[in-house]
Image (cartoon, helix red, strand yellow):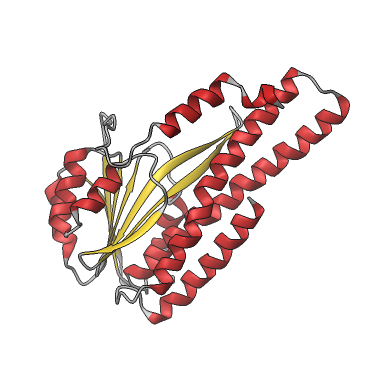
Amino acid sequence: YFSILANPLDLIRTKKVLQVNPTLEAHRVEPDNIKIFVYDYNSDGVEEKEVTSLQDCYKYLDTNKVSWINVDGLRKKVVEDISNHFGIHPLIAEDILSFGQRPKMDELNGLLFCLLSTLYYNETDNTVESEQTSIVLGKNFVISFQEDATKDVFNPLLEQIKVAGGKIRTSGADYLFYSMLYMIVDNYFIVMEKLGEVSEALEEDMIRRADNTTLSEITLLCNAVIVLKRSISPVRELINGILRSENNLVDEETEKYFKDVYDHINQANELA
């Protein structure tokens, strides 16, 4: 048991966690390339394009359609410029650029802001990977910021937007906001299903043999569950904050969908 706790990788990881200081400005390594996609839609049609100039996004601040701006890759100047134009408070911009941030929800400048972890299961290394995702809801727009452009939990959502007459196309920005949170939470269950399979296989191996390899696999599983629990548990408070909010950005009709997400995150938390 002690040998598991004393694993050098665990100690290094623990040291990094303890060194996180939220009062200090984050020094994030900026990506060489970022991608910005815009999806502007209503019940009649969808405009989908990748913008090469940041100024091309600015016209979507106030339109009679729902505008989704998705930023893949976090670059300080890009985040700050978008924040300045769309009225996103500097404190929220700091949170977007931070790393290792606890999932949270804020209301500033009449906007709703959520920051949470998107989880992926790496089958090659048998590890749980975490990506910080930030989402801002405005009057007729949603802006999402993702760290990694190589994987995207929102890909199924793009297909739903293209379906004429679908719920997303006939609803407002608040329903898009809900849909994004739902997909992140739903992905937690996919990760937990993978961990369940690993756990069952590990139990069978322990019956047949018990050696240093087994201990190493237990350590990996423990680390994965820690990442899972740390990411999922605060999201319950986040969703509850949206439900308690009196912000008029979320219609009464859409609140029932957030209650459904709240039920799902409670179930995910218990399973974790």
Q: Residue at x 30, y 70 (%)?
A: 42
Q: Residue furthest right?
A: 208
Question: Please, is residue 139 above or below residue 145 in the view?
Answer: below
Looking at the image, how many numbered discs can be counted on the residues?
Answer: 0
Q: Residue at the spot x=21%, y=72% of the render?
A: 64
Q: Position of residue 30 (x, y in %)?
A: 26, 31
Quadrant in the picture for the N terminus? top right
Q: Give the quadrant of residue 218.
A: top right
Residue at image position (43%, 41%) is 131
Question: Is 254 on the left or on the right of 189, as rendered?
Answer: left
Q: Residue at x 27, y 36 (%)?
A: 26
Q: Is residue 260 above or below residue 267?
A: below
Q: Is residue 170 left or right of residue 110?
A: right
Q: Is residue 35 left or right of residue 14?
A: left
Image quadrant where residue 101 sits: top left
Closest to the observer, 127 or 243: 243
| Place of residue 164 in the rendered image (x, y in percent of width and height, measured from the top left) | 40, 68
